[in-house]
Image (spheres, rainbow, N blue to C red):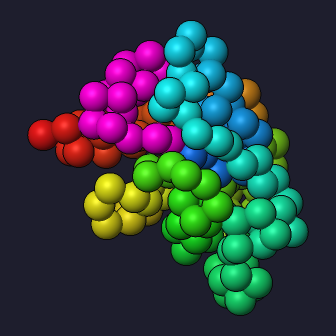
Amino acid sequence: MEPARVLDLCRAAGLKIATAESCTGGMVGAALTDVAGSSDVFERGFITYSNDAKREMLGVSSDTLAAHGAVSEAVALEMAAGALAHSRANIAVSITGVAGPGGSDHKPEGRVCFAVAGNGAPVAETVEFGALGRGTVRQAACDHALALLAQRARRAGS
């Protein structure tokens, strides 16, 4: 999904975006703000690479992190909710995953968890991109997050 199209869809639906990114390190926010005029839609982004940042900036629960680990739908949901709570946005997307190299039996390289909150019930999903290499996984995660924003904006606009 082209970032300009995501912005147009959100603009038409009256949505302001916040992002909460871990493994993508701000790529979604960068993609959106590369588009001239994005400031009327993109409200802010949080890069919360460490667990401390997730807790301090987004209010992710220590209990959730301990029970599920940072790469989980539970944490992704709390990240998205935290981005809404700590911004003036009304839609937020979050990303947390293992870009690689490496991983573990429980959390393999290429596993990325996403959540979207605001303008409807929060939803989370996990995508197994596979061991495609760090850059490819990060770009695929960025693209998927943009598609999730577009999907939510389309729903709001209909």
Q: Residue furthest top?
A: 36
Depth order, front residue of 2/34: 34
Q: Is 24 placed above or below 36 here?
A: below
The residue shown at (23%, 45%) is 156
Depth order, front residue of 116/90: 90
Q: Is 54 placed above or below 146 here?
A: below
The residue shown at (69%, 74%) is 60
Residue 111 at x, y percent in the picture: 60, 53
Residue 143 at x, y percent in the picture: 51, 30
Residue 158 at x, y percent in the picture: 12, 40
The residue shown at (67%, 43%) is 45
Q: Can residue 12 be seen in this view?
A: yes
All told, the count of numbered labels is 0
Placement of the N terminus among the 4 image quadrants? top left
Residue 35 at x, y percent in the picture: 56, 13
The residue shown at (71%, 89%) is 63
Magenta stretch in the rendered image: 2-17
* Residue 8: in magenta span: yes
Main secondary structure along the magenta-highlighted residues: helix
Q: Is residue 21 visible?
A: no
